[in-house]
Image (cartoon, grey):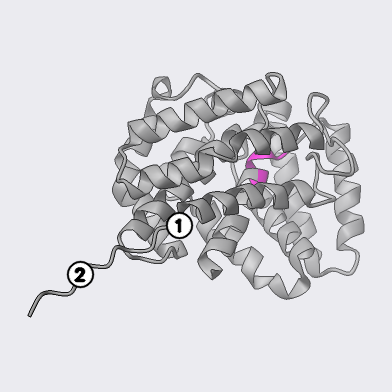
């Protein structure tokens, strides 16, 4: 009797990639959100609009499925980096040199790669499995990247601010398995899902803002600006957060205050998008 043919695991890296693009759109569409670009206004940004971000999304649309496919093929960290650097270059061409989604290229790219790795081995992506894959497969490389900035694609404004103020940059957050993403952002998004997508995303954003070493805020406002923004987020949460009937009005008032101070929590926005990706992919 002949052996049954082996069935290859179902790998849908295109779906993982599409979910990343949609997650970035989820973040863009949320309003009001302090200092950040939306379809309503440009927030604290004089160099970009919602249109700029949409052009960036269009330029990145092939990158996320490609890095998911690379993850499925068990690519090493250098190969993932090459894909990310090429994606950044396409983004900058599309935006006229404006850095719209560099953080998302890094964070969502790693998540897509981990999702592809799991799918290729017959495992469904779950938050715990994705986190374990990141740490086990590329954790040592991420730790090296966090310790040695020269290994990254140039010294970004965020990394410079992290070094100047002794903060934890995105690479260090990744090397720890994205604790703010998995322990704060995603639980907040799911815990408040009954409020509807808009308010749940607002809650997740503010919970991240309250605890994240957001180097975008530190770059724009120094350590004082970061600490001020974190306190505003804590005050919003202590007043009931997104469950407060006046949450939208309070968020709009904070938006104005952040714009007045030229502050924008871009790191928190990246983690909100990543949480939206996790919620969509892991639910499916």
Q: Which mark is residue 12?
A: 1
Label 1 crowd (10 A; few <14 / some 14-19 / many >=20) = some
Q: In the image, is residue 266 part of the stretch drawn in magenta?
A: yes
- Seen in the image, is 51 located left or right of residue 153? right
Q: Which residue: 33% across, 43% down? A: 138
Q: CA distance from mark 1 to mark 2?
A: 21 Å
Q: Which residue: 58% across, 56% down? A: 277
Secondary structure under tag 1 reads loop
Label 2 crowd (10 A; few <14 / some 14-19 / many >=20) = few
Q: Main secondary structure of the magenta part?
A: helix
Q: Quadrant of the N terminus?
A: bottom left
Q: Quadrant of the C terminus?
A: bottom right
Q: Is residue 187 above or below residue 262?
A: below
Q: Which residues are magenta?
A: 265-269
Q: Is residue 115 above or below residue 37?
A: below
Q: Position of residue 202 (x, y in %)?
A: 75, 58
Q: Earlier in the sequence, mark 1 or mark 2?
A: 2
- Seen in the image, is 140 located left or right of residue 17? left
Q: Quadrant of residue 280?
A: bottom right
Q: Is residue 99 above or below residue 65?
A: above
Q: Quadrant of residue 80?
A: top left
Whether pointer 1 and pointer 2 mark residues with C-beta atoms closer than 8 Å, the reply is: no
Secondary structure under tag 2 reads loop
Using the rendered image of the protein, determine whether residue 238 is visible from the camera's viewpoint: no
Quickly name the residue at label 2. 5
């Amino acid at each position: 009797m002949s052996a049954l043919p082996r069935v290859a695991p179902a790998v849908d890296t295109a779906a993982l990639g599409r979910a990343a693009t949609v997650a970035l759109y989820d973040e863009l569409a949320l309003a009001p959100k302090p200092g950040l670009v939306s379809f309503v206004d440009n927030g604290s940004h004089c160099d970009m609009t919602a249109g700029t971000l949409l052009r960036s999304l269009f330029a990145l649309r092939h990158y996320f499925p490609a890095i998911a496919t690379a993850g499925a093929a068990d690519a090493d960290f250098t190969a993932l980096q090459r894909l990310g650097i090429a994606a950044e270059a396409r983004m900058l061409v599309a935006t006229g040199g404006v850095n719209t989604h560099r953080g998302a290229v890094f964070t969502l790219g790693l998540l897509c790669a981990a999702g592809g790795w799991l799918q290729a081995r017959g495992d469904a992506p779950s938050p715990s499995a994705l986190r374990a894959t990141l740490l086990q497969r590329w954790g040592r490389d991420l730790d090296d990247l966090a310790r040695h900035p020269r290994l990254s694609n140039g010294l970004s404004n965020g990394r410079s601010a992290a070094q100047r103020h002794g903060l934890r940059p995105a690479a260090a957050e990744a090397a720890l398995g994205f604790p703010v993403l998995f322990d704060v952002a995603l639980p907040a998004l799911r815990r408040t899902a009954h409020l509807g997508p808009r308010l749940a995303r607002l809650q997740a954003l503010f919970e991240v803002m309250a605890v994240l070493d957001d180097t975008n805020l530190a770059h724009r406002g120094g350590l004082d600006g970061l600490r001020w923004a974190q306190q505003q987020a804590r005050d919003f949460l202590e007043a009931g957060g997104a469950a407060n009937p006046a949450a939208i009005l309070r968020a709009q008032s904070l938006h104005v205050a952040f714009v007045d101070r030229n502050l924008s929590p871009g790191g928190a926005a990246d983690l909100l998008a990543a949480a939206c990706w996790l919620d969509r992919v892991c639910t499916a």
